[in-house]
Image: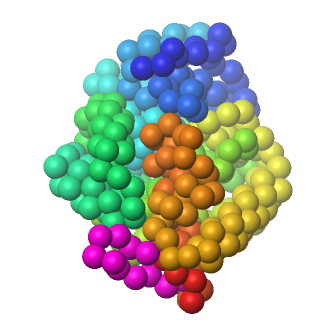
Amino acid sequence: MPNLRIPEKSIKEVAKNFYRVILPMPSRLEQVNVIVFAHEDGVTLFDTGFNLKDSFLMLEDSLKAIGRSVCDVDHVFITHYHADHCGMAGRIKEKSGAVIHMSEAGRQILQRIENEELLDDERRRFYLEQGIGEEKVDVMASVIQRFRRAIFPFEVDEYLNCDRKYSIGGTSFEVLPTPGHSRDHVCFFFRKEGILLSGDHVLQAITPNLAPDIFCPGFRSLRSFLDSLSVIREIPIAMILPAHGAPFSNLRDRVDEMIKHHEDRKNRILRSAEKFSRTAFEISVDIFGEDLSDFDLFLALNETYVHLVELVHEGIISKSWNGKWILYNVR
Ligand SMILES: [Zn+2]
């Protein structure tokens, strides 16, 4: 595990009663935010951070710095099933009895990934067909397993409801479905305050990675992501509190940049596929190179794949099967 860079000041008020707690995580992103809403009756958390010993202590210390404690947490709302977002929910609930809210889709995904063998078999077949070698698939499977084990087991108490208004501490928020980065992703929108808790949907410095959903082959990550971006683009937002990085405010510009980024990437992938009939992995190496960590190689393949899915949908690219791999050809 790499050395974790623990930020010095890990809690900061970013808007009235809203605090950003920065917690460590063992990956390139290094940090994840937990958004704390402190109100008269208790403390509500939006996402929880990765389940590391240090994270839990840091969360406790951070809450103490504002005169609260993990025991005061009344509700935990989760944006999506990734370990850096829901990893500590179970631990927090154990300590405080907090009610955990997550989407039904997120709960279903977690249930499926608990069945490790099924996951590994299906994932293995899927990736081998995309042209990546057996050895790299093994490395990828072990990384995924490590992330999965970093989730403290928990039961969801209430499924998120996108049709209702949630009231806490004298204010209210809505749940906006924003599938893309993951199928279950949601954002939390405090309309009166103009604050969007964007999870991984919109980040300022990086574009969130997109991946196929192995158990839901009909799910088009890129299409869903772009549609979700268009929806939130029109919402009146004063401040975005993302799950990674600092708060920011220029939502429309950022959304437009991200849409343009994917448009450019799709064109690059198309140009690569034009050269000759190739696997998704060959196209991915052509674009992102091969001199990447095993995990980045896998992220690059995912990114390439989700763009190819859209090019196939648009009828620009066709797929063929050579008995071992899926090949992509420009029509
Ligand atoms: Zn995520």
Is residue 187 positioned above or below 16 on the image? below
User: Looking at the picture, how far across and down is residue 206, in whole percent?
Assistant: 68, 44
State the extent of the magenta-drawn residues as a range.
317-327
- Residue 236 falls in which quadrant of the image? bottom right
In screen coordinates, is 117 left or right of 9?
Answer: left
Q: How many numbered marks, from 0 up?
A: 0
Q: Residue furthest front?
A: 276
Q: Residue at x 78, y 58 (%)?
A: 257
Q: Residue visible at 59% across and 10% down? A: 65
Q: In the image, 77: left or right of 315?
A: left
Residue 152 appears left or right of 40: left
As displayed, is residue 275 above or below residue 16? below
Colouring chosen for the image of the structure: rainbow
Image position, residue 258 (x, y; %): 72, 58
**Residue sitting at 48 percent across and 65 percent down?**
280
Q: Is residue 318 magenta?
A: yes
